[in-house]
Image (cartoon, rainbow, N blue to C red):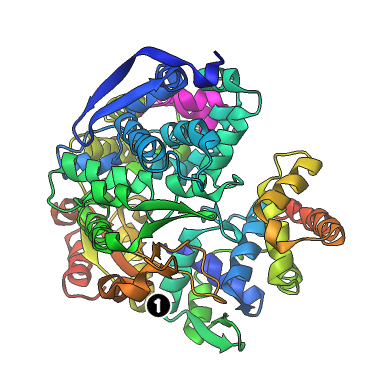
Amino acid sequence: MDYASQKLAEEKVFKDPVHRYIHVRDQVIWDLVSTREFQRLRRIKQLGTSYLVFHGAEHSRFSHSLGVYEIVRRISDDIFHGRPEWDENERLVVLCAALLHDLGHGPFSHSFEKVFQVDHEEFTREILLGDTEVNRVLTKVGADFPAKVAEVIAKTYGNKQVVSLISSQIDADRMDYLQRDAYYTGVSYGHFDMERILRVMRPVDDQVVIKSSGMHAIEDYIMSRYQMYWQVYFHPVARSAEVILRKILQRAKELSEGGYKFAQPPTHFLSFFDRTFTLKDYLALDEGVLMTYFQLWMTERDPILADLSDRFVNRRLFQYIDFDPGKDYRKLGELAQLFRKAGIDPDYYLIDDSTSDLPYDFYRPGEEEERLPIQLLMPSGEIKELSRLSQIVDAISGKRRTDYKLYFPAELLIDGKKKAVKQQILEMLREGGI
Amino acid sequence: MLQEHAKIVDFIAAAEGITGRKKMQKMIYILKKMGVPFQEKYEFHIYGPYSEELTARVEELCDMGFLSEEMEDKGSYVQYKYSVTKEGGDFRSTLKESVLEDPAYAEKLNEKSARFLELTATLLYFDQLERSEQIEKLHVVKGKLNFTEEEIEEAFAFIEELSALKKLP
């Protein structure tokens, strides 16, 4: 029997709080889970800094990846199996892509990518195609198999049904993370009837559509997503921790470039500072490594690096206020000047941050939208875009909500030093001057 | 602060306005690939490389009043035209240095059609591949657009011409 169709002697299961069990029968999947690159995902949290707000949110990208695999396995083996419009030959590639879609994520991905100008998707590709254990497993299936998996994840694969199971406005990735993140954060949002959604998914032409009888389950899913973004993912306190994290990495980089002698040399980061990193350097990083550096840097001579590290480790986060950048950007400049006068470096202690989300969008023929809409399959066989039928979805379609915050260390402004200028700063912050 | 927003305003000002969301997406992607320090993250979407972050940033700039967005009805379709407002011009001046050293490159890109820029951006998206593989991949993901050999040749020549940009800041 060839490796691609080789099955385990007995089915293996992973106990999972979201899907109850994750079922593995394919030798390929079992071997991929055991690779060092996949095991590394155990050491990277799915929600980054959110655990500082929702203490339960310590779950990893490992469990999310298994969850996405399980959803796609059920679609492929139970829902689409035997349907003429689904190509059974795509089963293994879509399962592998589901399992490996987040493989390139690094520690605290969002901040790390911003500071070091790297892209986790590029790393996913490199892990799949480079000299790795994952690549060796995939290559046993076929010489071109690693590239096929990479193409599905990069959304450039020829079969769009396969791509949309992993990446679309209703895909296995979102269905898993909404439920998983809701479970671990303990919030009551994020729950929807996934069983119902899976049962009404159908492969049609080059897309995956939803039988119109499942429209209300989809509405619930979209509202769950909307709530989770604003209640969990964009939580202003978690964003405060993200801001500090970004600034620690930025400070370490700046110090290193300026020739500063670290008491604890940032060995793991050096190749990222000068952009000579290799895949091996990237894979050597995880959140344990970063947290160790932050702990050690708490006693560095540089007061900014030491303070920021201490803030992150001991959760002494920045305060925040809302601000309107269109109206207040000049005042932000004035405020930065006042921070300098007060002896507080605004590059590290006065940070603007914006975040926004579009809950659902649809493609209008002739317009230049980039999102594939959710399509409903009517009993007549006709296909209709979701928001044309759902008033609830129509009400939030295409409406972006943006939130701007200004972060600063409140306690440094009331420490009794340089009172006059700090008073001026506080007045600007308190009186809505900014 | 807000420097990434200011870079977008600066670029649109240098291009003297841009008509078409797709066109703007591809122009910035192409320049990013040429080493211009735009920070927006791109993924592959319906029309090739696309940045959700850029879409969000442009919408934010419109809300802030630094960009104006006009919808042009072209009969069978609509297009969005972006230009920098007076306030946007003031905001632009907060940028320490212009994102493009030579604004002629913005004009050079702006002269091209959205279709041509989509082709160029898609080829650049696959620039880690051999040329023949790049073309093969283009036909897989853009089969419906039927790009001709001449168009593809022209796009490769354009990429070469723009590569001079890499010598800029």
Between residue A410 and residue B121, name the one nearer to us.
Answer: B121
* Amino acid bearing label 1: Met
**Rendered residue at 71%/68% (across/down):** B115
**Rendered residue at 38%/66% (across/down):** A378
- In reply to whether residue A381 is colored magenta, the answer given is no
Which type of secondary structure does the marked residue at label 1 adopt? helix
Q: Where is residue B130 in the image (x, y as percent from the top left)?
A: 77, 38
Q: Where is residue A327 in the image (x, y as percent from the top left)?
A: 34, 79
Q: Position of residue A407 (x, y in %)?
A: 27, 57
**Residue underneath mark 1:** B64
Between residue A138 and residue B134, name the one nearer to us.
Answer: A138
Residue A166, picture quadrant: top left
Asked if residue A110 lies left or right of residue A126, the reply is left
Residue A128, picture quadrant: top right
Residue B143 versus residue A276 in the image, above or below: below
Instruction: Specify the segment rendered in magenta.
Output: A261-286
Residue occupying the far top of the picture: A9
Subunit bearing disc 1:
B
Between residue B4 and residue B19, name the one nearer to us.
Answer: B19
Q: Position of residue A326 (x, y in %)?
A: 38, 76
- Is residue B150 in view? yes
Mark 1, residues whose alpha carbon is within 10 Å: few (<14), some, or many (≥20)? some
Between residue A89 and residue B110, name the one nearer to us.
Answer: A89
Asked if residue A204 lies left or right of residue A141, the reply is left
**Rendered residue at 47%/83% (across/down):** B87
- Is residue A290 in view? no
Which quarter of the image is occupied by the N terminus of chain A?
A: top right
**Rendered residue at 51%/24% (across/down):** A281
Total count of labels: 1
